[in-house]
Amino acid sequence: MIKKLTIEDIPQVVKIHKQELPGFLPQLGEGFLKKFYKITLTLPEIFTLVEKENEQILGFATGCVRTKGLYKKIIFRDLIGFAILLLSYFITHPKNLVKMVKTLTYPGFSNDSPELLTIAVIGCHQKKGIGTKLFQSCVAEFQKKGVKKFRVSFYDRLTAGKFYEKVGCKFENSFFFLREKMNYYCYEI
């Protein structure tokens, strides 16, 4: 059953995020991701939906209606807490400081368009329609919020393009981010 994320769901969502999603945020650790998702519960422009079966989360999806300055909004909700987490991380991983700065410059966070930020399903539950159900639920959530069109981006090296095309997204363009090619797809409601 798909429902909105609750605070009790966060530990499972963080585990899935770390296991299934490539990228920089999982490298920042579970503490960072737990705080990130907890704070997103307080922001009206962002939502996370989870697919739950017998109290186990099989997958989740996060969407945002207004992406401009998203990380800044989240971090400033608990600046000291995030500062402590990030400082402890960068003491042991100083080379990744540049990645953090570049992550804050992600193109989607400057143009303020609605975006499906993540879809992740536990590996053993993939290819069972859970991702499609999550996507369709996100479409319905965007529609409730008055969104008529949203984008999704992903690393070109991933096979996600086939999934997004299957659910009705159209290729928009490619760009480079953190030295990797990424693709933007668009979905019109």
Image: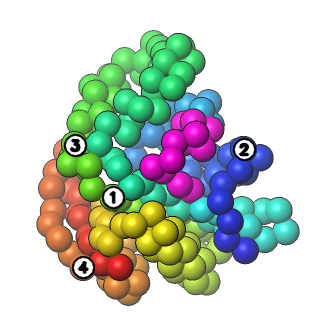
Q: CA distance from mark 1 to mark 4?
A: 15 Å
Report the Cα–Cα distance between label 3 and label 4.
21 Å
**Residue 89: percent from the left, percent from the top?**
49, 21
Residue 28: within the magenta?
Answer: no
Tag 3 residue: 110
Amino acid type assigned to the residue bearing label 3 in the image: Ser
Q: Residue at x 30, y 65 (%)?
A: 151
Marks 2,1: beta carbons within 8 A: no
Closer to the camera, 181 or 184?
Answer: 184
- Seen in the picture, residue 172 relative to 9 is either above or below; the reply is below
- Measured Cα–Cα span from mark 2 to mark 4: 34 Å
Is residue 145 visible to the viewer in this orientation of the structure?
yes
Q: Nearer the viewer, mark 3 or mark 4?
A: 3
Q: Nearer the viewer, mark 1 or mark 4?
A: 1
For marks 2 and 1, the one nearer the N-term is 2
Instruction: Pinpoint residue 33: horizontal percent, then vertical percent.
Output: 56, 38
User: Regarding mark 3 in the picture, which secondary structure is present there?
Assistant: loop
Q: Which of the two discs, 2 and 3, labels the residue nearer the N terminus?
A: 2
Q: Which numbered disc covers residue 23?
A: none
In the image, the segment drawn in magenta is 36-48
Q: Residue at x 56, y 56 (%)?
A: 48
* Disc 1 from disc 3: Cα separation: 11 Å
- Residue 73 spot, x, y in % from top left: 41, 32
Residue ID for mark 1: 114
Q: Which residue is mark 2?
A: 7
**Quadrant housing residue 103:** top left
